[in-house]
Image (spheres, coloured by chain):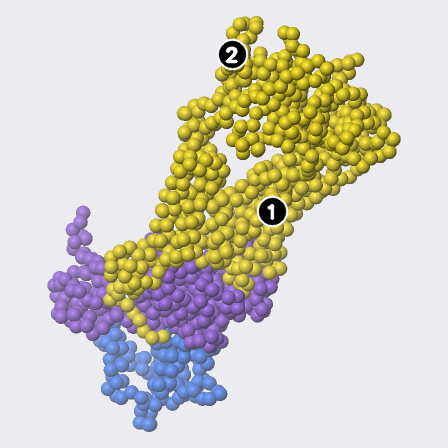
Amino acid sequence: MAVKFIINTGSNTPIYQQITGQARLAVASGRLAPGDQLPSVRALAEELVVNPNTVARAYADLTREGLLEARAGRGVFITRKRKVYSRAEGWRRLEPLLDALIGEAMVLDFTREELRKAFEEKLGQWKHPKGGDRNEE
Amino acid sequence: MKALILKDLRENLKAALIGLVIFSLLLFRSYQIAGSTLATLLAGAMTNQIIALQPLLSPNLLADAGFFCAIFGAALGWLQTRNEAHRDLWAFLIHRPVTRAEIFRGKITAGLCLYAFGAGLPLAILVAVARIPGHVAAPFEWAMVLPLVSFFLAGVDFYFAGMLTGLRQARWYASRVFGLGLAIITVSLGGTLPETWQWLTLIALAAVILAAAVWGAYQSGGYYRGQPLAGRLALIVAMGAGCALVLFLAAAFLFFVVFNPLSHPSYQYSYYQMTRDGAIYKATTTQDNALVEIVDLEGHPLLDPKTGQKMELKEFQKLLPYGTMVSTSFNHWNQYRSAFDTTHFFSLINITDKTLWYLDRHGKLIAYDGRTRKLAGTLNPRGSDGALTSESFLTQYGSVGYYYNPYDEVSWKLLATATAVYRADFKARAVKPVFTLTNDDEIGAYADVQTGYEDNQPSRDSFITTRKTVCLLDSAGRTIFAVPYQPGYVDYPQVQISFLQPTNGATANFAVWFRPEPEKNRKSGGKMPDHVVWLGPGQAVAKSADLPPLPVQEFSSWPDKLAASLLPPPAHLVFDKDISSPWNALSFAFAFLSAVIAWSLVRRYDSSPKAIAGWTLFVFLLGIAGLLTLLCVQEWPAREPCPRCKKLRAVDRELCEHCQSPFSPPEKNGTEIFAPL
Amino acid sequence: MRNEASVIRTRGLTKYFGAKPAVYELSLDVPRGCVFAFLGRNGSGKTTTIRMLAGLEQPTRGTGSILGCDIQALTPEIRARIGYLTEEHQLYSWMSVQECGEFQSKFFANWNNRIFRGIAGHFGLKSTAKVKDLSRGERAGLCLALTLAPEPELLLLDDPGMGLDPVAHRTLIESMIYLTRKSDRTIFFSSHDISDVERVADYIAVLDRSVLRACCPLEKFQECVRQVRLRFSGAPPALPKIPGLLQSIRTENELRVTCAPYDGEAEKTLRALSPMEMETVPLGLEDAFISYLGERGEKTFILSEMEAQP
C-alpha cells in the first residue's frame, strides 16, 4: 500500500473527511492507481486509532463518489475513475481551492508571474493524470 | 466469597495481631497481680481482693477484659469498613458478581475470625494456664469462665457497632457513633440483670440487631433509604438505644453538673440505731452525712455525757455494739446468678500452715497449698458416727460484712450445714459436729461472730437461724440462747444480733432485731415495723418492741425531677411509680410533643401511612430520644416550589403531593442539539 | 433481554445532593454496540450519572435500566457483564499486581488471563509490584486490565484517561478500539479529552449544569455548532436575540457569532443586519465544545478602547 493516512484531531475538518480528502488526493496524484488495495475498515481503524465507523463512513463516501469499490471476500480496491461529477460541479469544487491558493500567494507577496511559473512547473512534475478518461463512461 | 474472606483476613491481620499482643500483656499483668494477692495473704497481710486468688474472677482482669473486648471489637469492625472508605474503592468492592449480602457475610466471617483470634486466643490460653494444677491456689469450676465469656461475646456487639459506625453515611458525623450505644447499654446491663443467661440472651439479641443494621448498610451503601425493611428497623433500634443513652447522659449531666450545685437539694434520711447499752435511737442525717439530730424513741435528743451538748455522729459511732446480721433463706442458696456477681463463687475462710481453706458455693470445704498451689484436700461433714454425710456447708453469703481477716487468725472455724453446726479443725484436718438440730428443723442462716479474746485467741460464737428459732452457740456448740423466730422468717428474713454491755442497772446481754424483707415492705407501703427483742437473765425474752416505720424519704428536688422527666414515659414510670405524679405527666407531655413533631415531619416527607404511624408510635414511646433518633436516621429529600401550585413539594416523588402534577422537563435554552442515534 | 436495542436507558433520572440537583431529569438511550461519549464540565453531573448507572448511588427520582435490569436492583449476573472503571483508579494498596489479578479472577467466570497479562504487560507492570508503589499511570493500566479481562459486554468508564501519560493514553484508546471488534460490545465513557472523543466516539451526550443539552452523533454536533463572521464598514450594530446563540465577539468592524444549532432563522436574522461580508467559519470539535459549554454572552474586544487605557 503506497499511501499512509495521517489524521489530526482538533482540526476543523472531521476525521472522515480527512481520510476521504487524502484518498482523493492520492488518487489524483497517482500515488494510488486503480486496482490498488486499501486496508480493511478494521485494519485502518486500528492503525489510525479511530472508530471503525469513521473509516466505514469515509469508505462509503468514496464508494459513492466512484473512487472505491468493495469486492466480496477480497477487500476494497481503487476503481477506475468514473465521472460522477458534472463539469459545473467539478468547477464548484475547484474554485475555492483556486481562491485559497491565489489569496495565500498574494498575502505572501508573490507576483503573478512567479505564481504562474510555479504552477506550470508543478504541473509538469506531476505524473500525467488520466484526465482524459472523462470520456469513458 | 472465599477470596473476599481471605482478602479481609490479610488486610486486617496486623490490627488483630496488635490486639492479641496488647490483650496478652493485659491478661498477663492481671494474672501476676492475682498471684501477688496470694503472696500478700501468705505474708499475713490484709487484702480486700480475695476473689482475685482466682485470676479468672479478679475484678481487675475482668475490667481489663471487658474494656479490651469492647474497644478491640469496635476498632476491628470500624477498621474493616474504613478499608473501603474511599468511594471508588467501595465501588471496586461492590461491583462484582456477588450480592451485597454475600459481601457482608464474607466480611463478618473474616472479622469475627480475627476477633476470636485477637481476643479469644489470649482468653483461652489464660483459662488453660489457670487450669494447670500448681498455677492457681483457688477453686475452679467452669461457671467461673462465664464472666470472661460474656465480655468476649459482648465484644461481638461492639464489633458490629464499630462496623455500623464506619459504614453509616450520616448528616451529623457524631451520630455515626450512636450505634455503639446499644452495645454499651447491653454490657452495662450485666450488672443489673439477676441471671447470667438473661445477660447472654440480651448480648445475642443486640448482636443480631446490630448485625442486621450492618447488613442493611451494605445493601444501601450506608444510607437509610434504599435498605430493606429489616435493616431499617434494626438501624432504628440501634440508633434509638444510642440516642436514649445520649439523652440519659445529658440528663445525668444536667442532674449532677448543672442542677445539683445550684439547687442544693437536701433530703434527710432517718434510721434506727442501737447502742451498746441496748437503747435505740433514731438518727437523722442529710445526704452529705451531716447530722441533723439523734433522738430516743420518745423524741428526746441524745446528749454527749462528756460535753453536755448534742451527741456528734463520730462519738455516736463509738457507742455501737458488736454483732452481725444474717439473711434467712432456704431456697437457691448456692445458685450462681449474675456474671457480675463473682464473689458468690467462694469465700476464703482460713489460712493455716500456708494452706488456704475455701468454702465454695456448693458448700464444699476445699484446701489449696499456698506454696505449691495445688489442691491439698477437702473436708466434708461427717456425722457423729464418723461417717461422711452428703450434706454441704452453708455459705455465709447472706451475712453482712463477712470478709477474711488475717489478723484474727485461728486454725479452726465453726461451719453449719442444714442440720448441724460443725467445728472444722484445719491443723488436724478434721471436722466434727458440735451442735445438731434435734427436730426436723433446718438451719437457714449462719454467721460466726467474734466476741473477744480467750487465751489470747479470738473467741467466736455461732449465730444461727432456723425455721423456728434464733440461737447463739458457743465455740463448743453449747447454746447460749435460743428464742423463737417471731415474726416468721418469710416476712422477716433479716435478723441482727447485738452484743450488749448494759449500764445503768439494765441486765440484757443480747438484742435480736428482726427486719422486714425490703420488697414486701415496699409493696405494703413501708408499713412493716422492725421488731426488737432484748434478752434478760436466763436469756429469755425480757422485753420486745416494734419500731414505728420511718417515712420513705424524698431523694430529689425539682431540678433533678425535671432532668429525669426527659426520659421516655416507660422508663420514667419505673423510677416514679406514682401514675398521677406531675413529673410523670411532664414526661408524657415531652413524649407527646415529640410525637407530634415527628408526625408532622414524617408526614411531610413520606407518604406511606405505615411509616407515619410507626414513627409516631416509636417517638411517643421513646420520647425525646425517639425524636432524636428520627432526626439522626431519616434522610429528608429537598423541597422545591411546584411550578403549578406553588407549594413546596419533595423532590423525590414523581408527582406533586398537592396538585399531582409531575416534574417538568428542564427548560430549553435554545441551544439543544438532539438527533436520533 | 440480551439483545435489547438499548443497553442503557434512563428516564427522568435525577439526583439531588442536599438542595442542589447534580443531575436533573436525564433521559437518554444508549444503543448496543456503540461508543458513547459523555461530556460536560467538571461538576456538571457526569460522575454522579455513571455512579447511578453502576448502582452505587441511589437516584432521587427517575428510573434507569442497564442491560435490561433496573439500576436500583442490579443482580450479580448483570454486574458480571459490566466493566466499571472509576476516575481515581483505586485499588487495595497492599496487593501486588498479580494478587489483584488473582483476586478478581476468582469472581468472574469468564476471566481471560491472557488479556489481563497482555494489558498489564503493555503498561510495563511487574507482577510483584505493590499497588502503593505504582505510579498513577501504572495504576490506571492495572485497573484497565482488571476491568477488561472479564470481557464485559458493557464498559462504564469514568474519565479513564485522567492522569495518563501520552503513551498510556494511546494504549487506552487502542484498547477501546480493539473492543469494538465484537459488535455487541458497548462503551459508555466520560472524558475531558476532546481528541479522544473525536477519535473513538460514535455518539456524544453533553451535560451542562446537570441538564442534558445534546445527544446526537458526533458529526451532527460538529455540524450544528458554527461560527459566523460578519464584517461591517463601521461599528457593528447591536445584536438582536438569536435562538441558539452561544457567544459573540465584537471588535471594531467585526462581529463573530457562534450558534448552536445554526439554522435558517438565525441566518436570516444575521443577514438582516446588513453586513458587508458574512461567512461561515468551520469549527473543530474542541472549539465547538468549548463554545457550547463556555460562558454565554457577548465579549467586546475593541483595540482603540484598550489602547486608550493608561
Give the numbered dot on residue A78. Answer: none
Mark 1 element type: helix
What chain is colored yellow?
B
Q: Amino acid at mark 2?
A: His
User: Chain A: what color?
Assistant: blue
Rendered view: B373 above or below B288: below
Please tell me how many numbered marks the rendered image carries: 2
Q: Which mark is residue B201?
A: 1
- From the image, state whether disc 2 or disc 1 is nearer to you: 2
SS under mark 2: loop
Q: Colour of chain C?
A: purple
Instruction: Answer above or below: position of C187 versus B190.
Output: below
What is the chain letter for disc 2? Answer: B
* Image height of B434 relative to C114, above or below: above
CA–CA distance in space, label 2 to label 1? 55 Å
Instruction: Give, as a three-letter code, the residue at label 1.
Output: Thr
Is label 2 in contact with label 1 (beta carbons under 8 Å)? no
The numbered mark, 2 or 1, whose residue comes first in the sequence reads: 1
**Nearer to us in this view, C2 or C244:** C2
Q: Position of residue B256 (x, y in %)?
A: 46, 29
Q: Quadrant of residue C71?
A: bottom left
Q: Which residue is mark 2?
A: B300
Q: Residues within 10 Å of mark 1 (few under 14, many from 20)?
A: few
Residue B468 visible at all: yes
Which residue corresponds to the image point at 46% horizontal and 77% vertical from the top-left? C3
Mark 2, Cα crowd under 10 Å, few <14 / some 14-19 / many 20+, is few
Look at the image and tell me whether residue B359 can be seen.
no
Question: As drawn, is C140 to the left or to the right of C285?
Answer: right
* Quadrant the C terminus of chain B occupies: bottom left
Q: Position of residue C123 (x, y in %)?
A: 53, 62
